[in-house]
Image: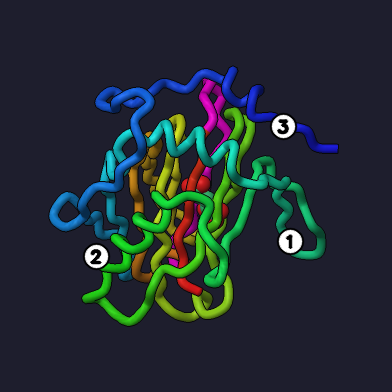
Amino acid sequence: MFEFTYARVMTLAYQASLFDDPGAAAVVGVLGESVQRIPLDSGAWIDLRPGWVANSDSLFEDLVGAVEWRADRREMYDRIVEVPRLVSWFGEADRLPHSTLDDAMRLLNEHYAHLDAERFATAGLCFYRTGDDSVAWHGDRVGRSTQRDTRVAILSVGAERVLSVRPVGGGQTERFPVGHGDLIVMGGSCQRTYEHAILKSAKTVGPRISVQFRRA
Ligand SMILES: O=C(O)CCC(=O)C(=O)O
Ligand SMILES: [Fe+2]
């Protein structure tokens, strides 16, 4: 039986953002030229927008309480393995659990509208309670993304964790520390030619929630 309470989460310290106004509502910032493009090989790329959501700690706390979290399970080859983290998923027809996420999805769609007809339409939420929570190396290869380029935008709130990215078949691992309202977008061929992971942390880290926006 799985038990994890709001009270328990709030006892886990996470370092608050330096520039935030304690207790103030979260606000999604502009994208535009504040987005930094990092080209990878094989037509893959990463966009970074640090501090995209201001006062993100209040969004973190709201999501901890408002979302119906469940244990993650994932099919791997011939078995289903536990993925040590909590998740919740919102499809195209679902109401997102926070109005800040509606704003975030709309701004992302405006920002990337000039590229193609792909639109962010779903939101997957993952809750990493401690440094032991993690997701192993993988590419988000579902449906059409097995063949075609796609974008996955990840908003991180709560404590910082490292999103590691490496080429499929070997090569250098890039490490992107993300938390406290940071945005990272994986685009181009990234889901096919690279893989990514949130590896376990040996250091004591606070809880983090990631919100992954994907197409329908
Ligand atoms: O939590 C993250 O930032 C990444 C999660 C992820 O890669 C996934 O769930 O597919
Ligand atoms: Fe992923």
Q: Position of residue 54 (x, y in %)?
A: 29, 37
Q: Decide: marks 3, 2 in contact (CB < 8 A)?
A: no
- Sequence-first disc among 3 and 2: 3
Residue at (39, 49) in percent of width and height: 100
Q: Is residue 47 left or right of residue 80?
A: left
- Disc 1 or disc 3, which is closer to the eye? 3
Residue at (41, 68) in percent of width and height: 120
Q: Which residue is mark 3?
A: 4
- What is the number of the mark on residue 84? none
Give, as a three-letter code, the residue at label 1.
Glu
Give, as a three-letter code, the residue at label 3.
Phe
| Mark pair 2, 1: CA separation | 34 Å
Q: Which residue is mark 1?
A: 75
SS at circle 3? loop
Q: Is residue 89 left or right of residue 52?
A: right
- Sequence-first disc among 2 and 1: 1
Please give the range of residues in magenta.
192-207
